[in-house]
Image (tube, helix red, strand yellow):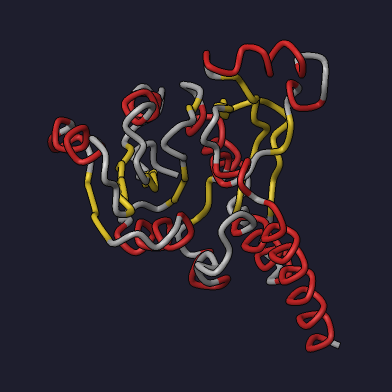
Amino acid sequence: MSRSALVSCVIPVFNGERYLTEALGSVLRQTRAPIEIIVVDDGSTDDTPRILEGMGDRITTVRQANAGPSAARNRGIEKARGDYVAFLDADDLWLPAKTETQLRCFERDPRLAVCTSLMQNFWAEDLAEEEARLKDTDTARPQPGPSQTLLVRKGAFDRVGPFDPALLHRDTQDWVTRARAAGLRFEQLDEVLVRRRLHANNLSRCRGAADGDELFAILRKKLATRQTAS
C-alpha cells in the first residue's frame, strides 16, 4: 500500500455546534495523511453551518434535509474519493494515531476489508455526577466501538450495501452483521483509538422501545439470510 492511500472521514452532524470543532480537530491532527473530511450537515438549525464555513477548503460540506445519521453516512460514502472510509460522530474524538494504526492492518493483510478498535467513554462537564457514579462500571472501561471505530475498504460497501436509513440506533450493528454474512474479513484491534463523549443529548439516551424493535429487525434479517443460504 502506498503511504499516500487516501482515507475519507465521514462525519454526520445535526445541531452539533457544541463539540463539532473538537471532532474536526481530532481528524486534522491524525499522524497519517492524507485524509479527506466530508461533513454531512443533516438539516442543522444551530450554528453548525457557520462553523463548517469557517473550516474553508480543509473539509467538504454536504447539506441535506434532516434524514437521520444513517442516511447522512450514506451520503458521505457516495461523495468519498478515498481508498478507505472511516466515520466519526460530531461529538466524539479520534486519537491521533487512529488511521495510522488501522492502515497498518490493511498493509499486513491485503484481504482485510474492515478494521475496528476499542473505544473509551468520557463524560462532558455537565455529567460530572454521572461520571462519579459510573466510574467503576463497564461504561467507564474500554469496549468495542460502533461506527466511530470502523475503517472500511471503499469496495466493501459495493458488496454489502449502505447503512439502513430506517435504523436510527442499530445501523452499524446491522451493517457489520451483513458484512460478516457476506464473508468480509474483519480485524478487531484490542486498543482504544476513539473517545466517545457522553453528554445530556446523546442519541443513545433516547433509544427506548424503538431500540428493541431495531434489534429484532436485525435478527430477523440475519435469520432470513441463513435460510436463503441453506
Q: Is residue 63 left or right of residue 6?
A: left
Q: Residue at x 49, y 71 (%)?
A: 158
93 shown above or below 162: above
Query: Splitting the image into 4 quarters, where does residue 138 fall?
Result: top right
Residue in view at x 82 percent, y 15 percent: 136
230 versus 191 height, above or below: below
Residue 215 visible at all? yes
From the viewer's side, name the closer residue of 78 and 69: 69
| In the foreground, 46 or 118 | 46
Is residue 106 something one can see in this rendering? no
| 211 versus 134 height, above or below | below
Quarter holding residue 26: top left
Q: Which residue is nearer to you in this view: 105 or 149?
A: 149
Q: Residue at x 55, y 27 (%)?
A: 199
**Count of numbered badges drawn on the protein:** 0
Rendered-image quadrant of the C terminus: bottom right
- Please name the residue shown 77% across and 68% down the image: 216
Q: Position of residue 210 (x, y in %)?
A: 67, 61
Q: Quadrant for the N terminus, please.
A: top left
Question: Where in the figure is residue 27, as x and y percent of width and height?
Answer: 38, 30
Say which quarter of the image contains residue 139.
top right
Would you place residue 158 above or below residue 225 in this image?
above
Q: Quick check: 205 left or right of 80?
A: right
